[in-house]
Image: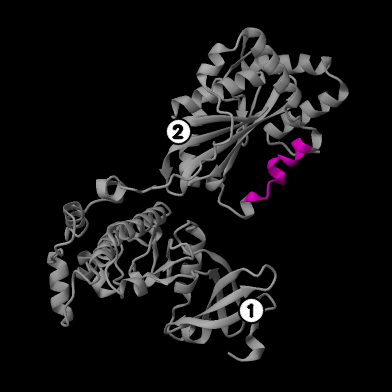
Amino acid sequence: MDNKMSVLMERYEIGRLLGQGTFAKVYYGRCVRTGESVAIKMIDKEKVLRVGLMNQIKREISVMRLVRHPNIVQLFEVMATKTKIYFVMEYAKGGELFNKVAKGKLKEDVARKYFQQLINAVDFCHSRGVFHRDLKPENLLLDENENLKISDFGLSALAESKRQDGLLHTTCGTPAYVAPEVINRKGYDGAKADIWSCGVILYVLLAGYLPFHDSNLMEMYRKIGKAEFKCPSWFPPEVRRLLSRILDPNPNTRISIAKIRDHPWFKRAINPKPAKTHLENIDVASSSTDAVSGPSESSSSAATERQDMVTLNAFDIISLSAGFDLSNLFEEPCLKKEARFTSWRPASVIISKLEEVAKRLKLKTAKKEAGLLRFEGTKEGRKGILTVDAEIFEVTPAFHLVEMKKSNGDTLEYQKLLKDGIRPGLKDIVWVWQGEQQPESSQKQDDGQVQPQQQECQASEDKQQQPPEQQQQQQLVEQLLQQEKLP
């Protein structure tokens, strides 16, 4: 590459060639500002336009923005000139998994680790409605820590690509890794086709060669259609049974990803060295601790909590208004990582209720500091262990705002937990969730039952007794919650 092109748009230094295909070349790059290593995929725009593949390029960009996962190559940014399109992506220092397999079969533990990471990443793609359709060792890269990264979503499909019969109909993929139903050209389920390819990859990792191979392409297709393959003598019985269920020529009876993940061989040594959880080095709030603390102890700790709790001023409240929320410009509303609600209950009651709901949902609970709690799942999710932070803010002594935010794990799993578990569990203390018009349930205040209409009267009385500054804050809160235009 000539010297004029050695720096791309004054942002990336372009180095050696890493690989190339029909329409693109991939170069090693380095960010000028941070020094971070990247891979730069350089696509010839003229060639792509000539063969009508521009829509495929656009789809690849859309898909890579959808699937952000530790075991998927990340797309950082896309740039273009009159003649070229540039994908700036995560650099996988370890190269292709194919190069490792080409030297011979892998040890069982190593093969299992790669297969676990592959299945987790594919499962994540499917949860986002993305089907890769070209899974093979050449499209699986390794980072500097020997972790697997799925790449090349050029042939991927979105769920919306299905026809009225609910199936995909474009025949694509690499012959040796493609599922029988794809070859038959009668329509196929993208998820089940990906599972088949994962089975072929597992066989290759453990054997060092393909399960279906023949110099005659039609004969190879015949073997694939009937799932004619033999496992080498060194394959453990558990692996043989698992492969027979993955490489099932009938997609309707083929094993699902959920059942693969539940298979004894797959689950073995999935976390040989458990990583430190987010809750370590945090004082865990246990029911036994609450049981031994006396009334005076509880009241003093509640007073301390109130003292240390963050108090919102008018500007804080205005900044939480929907009119000032720019997150919709960057993420889908349904994929938001945070939710807020208001409550007329004391902070101590809110904390107790949060801990009660967490216990019911089998979440670990930790108290980081006054007004801030952390909840953590007990099982590994699609993107690690799900962790949710809940912070309580004092608007007035009698009125609180609670913000719940996902700090780790998969956003879809967080949204499901919020919808099916957290929101129903908190209905007794919630006055209104942000974005809703009416109070969700009646609440008790001052040890008496207060209906929504009574709450308005109570709020009016409170305002008369409050200093002017607190009255202004209260008015702003009410306007915010009613979704009216703020002054």
**Residue at (74% x, 39% y) in the render:** 485
Is residue 331 shown to the viewer in this render?
yes
Label count reads 2
Q: Which residues are magenta?
A: 316-327
Is residue 447 shown to the viewer in this render?
no
Circle 2 Cα neighbour tier, 10 Å, few/some/many (<14 / 14–19 / ≥20): few
Residue 300: % across, % down: 70, 14
Instruction: Tell me where residue 313 sits by quadrant.
Output: top right
> What is the distance, in whole Å, between disc 2 and disc 1 at their CAs?
48 Å
> Relative to 245, is 317 on the left or the right?
right
Based on the picture, tell me whether residue 320 belongs to the magenta stretch.
Answer: yes
On screen, residue 105 above or below 251 = below
Disc number for residue 420: 2
- Write down the residue under mark 1: 13
Label 2 amino acid? Asp
On screen, residue 103 above or below 233 = below
Residue 431: % across, % down: 62, 24
User: Which of 162/330 is in front?
Assistant: 330
**Residue at (51% x, 67% y) in the render:** 61
Kind of element beneath mark 2: helix
Instruction: Tell me where residue 191 sits by quadrant.
Output: bottom left
> Relative to 253, is 464 on the left or the right?
right
User: Which of 179/440 is in front?
Assistant: 179
